[in-house]
Image (cartoon, helix red, strand yellow):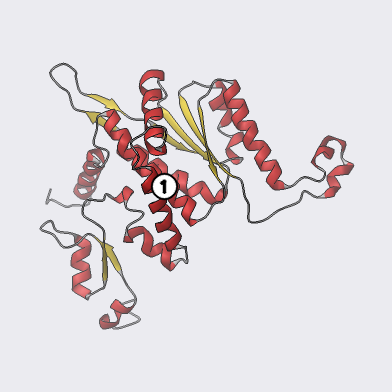
């Protein structure tokens, strides 16, 4: 960009999203100041993996044309639900308790999230970072108990694709997983299965059906098979996948993660081991500042 335009014009094309100025040096702030670039602030008390509903997430969403008002509305809706003290009325507290108890009492050390919708696949990828980086920690020792590690390994899967790559393990492998199935019940389009299959006896049952029905049947088959093998399953239903419902679900997962940290006895908001990797990376690149 510097080759294409004068430095004085850079501020018309670049916006910086970073932490506010503070006593702790922030490299991106130095770059912003050097070129007088406009900025949006990430609140100091919000860690990166929890920052999706701050400017670091909302600004790119707005640029991409995503319904930001819908995202904010979804957060407000779920904030009311997750503010209730009752376990039965608070989905975040309930999920946190289920994960904690199954991990502690039933040795379910793996948490699988499997959406049956391409529109939700990125959510399960995001959840993998949120859960792993927040919950995988060392519980400090006390006079009566030694320090010990806690956590669950998150796995992102996609239905129906991973029925043919992971389900064999989930059904016949070690019973050490809690599986969350995400389903969408209303679709934006309808795709009919071609009538030509009516001429093939082995596939004639597909006549008059839609791909939506086939996906729903595969999803139900996965749940039925898992339950028949006594594998614990949580089923989450989206009446429609849109900005509001996705935001509700992601906001709930953030609150769930914070509560799970309380139950596991760790700080869900730090990442000491990741910081160690950053130290070694800087060292390997010749940074001797420590």
Q: Nearer the viewer, residue 65 or 3?
A: 65
> In which quadrant will I find the N terminus?
bottom left
Q: Identify the residue at the far top of this view.
A: 144
Q: Residue at x 18, y 52 (%)?
A: 286
Would you place residue 13 above or below residue 276 in this image? below
On screen, residue 213 versus residue 102, left or right, reads right
Q: Residue at x 37, y 47 (%)?
A: 80
Q: Quadrant of residue 260?
A: top left
Q: What residue sits right under mark 1 in the picture?
A: 250
Q: Nearer the viewer, residue 172 or 209?
A: 209
**Percent x, y of residue 127:** 41, 43
Q: Residue at x 29, y 82 (%)?
A: 9
Q: Residue at x 39, y 42 (%)?
A: 253
On screen, residue 82 versus residue 207, left or right, reads left
Q: Quadrant of residue 132?
A: top left
Would you place residue 222 above or below residue 161 in this image? above
Would you place residue 109 above or below residue 248 in this image? above
On screen, residue 1 versus residue 212, left or right, reads left
* Number of callouts: 1
Q: Nearer the viewer, residue 60 or 200?
A: 60
Helix, strand or loop for disc 1: helix
**Percent x, y of residue 110:** 43, 29
**Percent x, y of residue 213:** 70, 43
Q: Badge 1: few (under 14), some or many (20 or more) residues near its Cα, within 10 Å?
A: many
């Amino acid at each position: 960009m510097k080759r294409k335009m004068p430095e004085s014009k850079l501020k018309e094309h670049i916006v910086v999203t970073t932490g506010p100025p503070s006593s702790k040096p922030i490299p991106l702030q130095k770059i912003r100041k050097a070129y007088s670039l406009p900025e949006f602030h990430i609140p100091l008390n919000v860690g990166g993996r929890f920052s999706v509903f701050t400017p670091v997430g909302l600004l790119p969403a707005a640029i991409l044309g995503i319904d930001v008002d819908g995202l904010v509305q979804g957060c407000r809706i779920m904030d009311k639900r997750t503010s209730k003290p009752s376990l039965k009325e608070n989905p975040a507290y309930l999920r946190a308790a289920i994960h904690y108890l199954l991990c502690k009492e039933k040795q379910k050390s793996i948490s699988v999230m499997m959406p049956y919708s391409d529109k939700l696949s990125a959510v399960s990828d995001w959840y993998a970072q949120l859960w792993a980086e927040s919950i995988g920690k060392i519980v400090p020792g006390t006079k009566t108990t030694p320090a010990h590690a806690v956590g669950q390994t998150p796995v992102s899967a996609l239905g129906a694709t991973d029925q043919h790559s992971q389900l064999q393990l989930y059904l016949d492998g070690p019973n050490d997983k809690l599986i969350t199935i995400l389903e969408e019940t209303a679709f934006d389009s309808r795709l009919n299965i071609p009538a030509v299959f009516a001429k093939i006896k082995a596939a004639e049952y597909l006549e008059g059906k839609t791909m939506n029905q086939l996906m729903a049947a595969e999803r139900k088959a996965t749940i039925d098979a898992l339950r028949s093998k006594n594998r614990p399953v949580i089923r989450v239903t989206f009446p429609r996948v849109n900005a509001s419902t996705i935001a509700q679900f992601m906001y709930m997962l953030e609150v769930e993660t914070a509560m799970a940290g309380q139950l596991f006895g760790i700080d869900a908001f730090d990442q000491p081991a990741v910081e160690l990797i950053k130290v070694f990376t800087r060292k390997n690149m010749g940074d001797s500042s420590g």
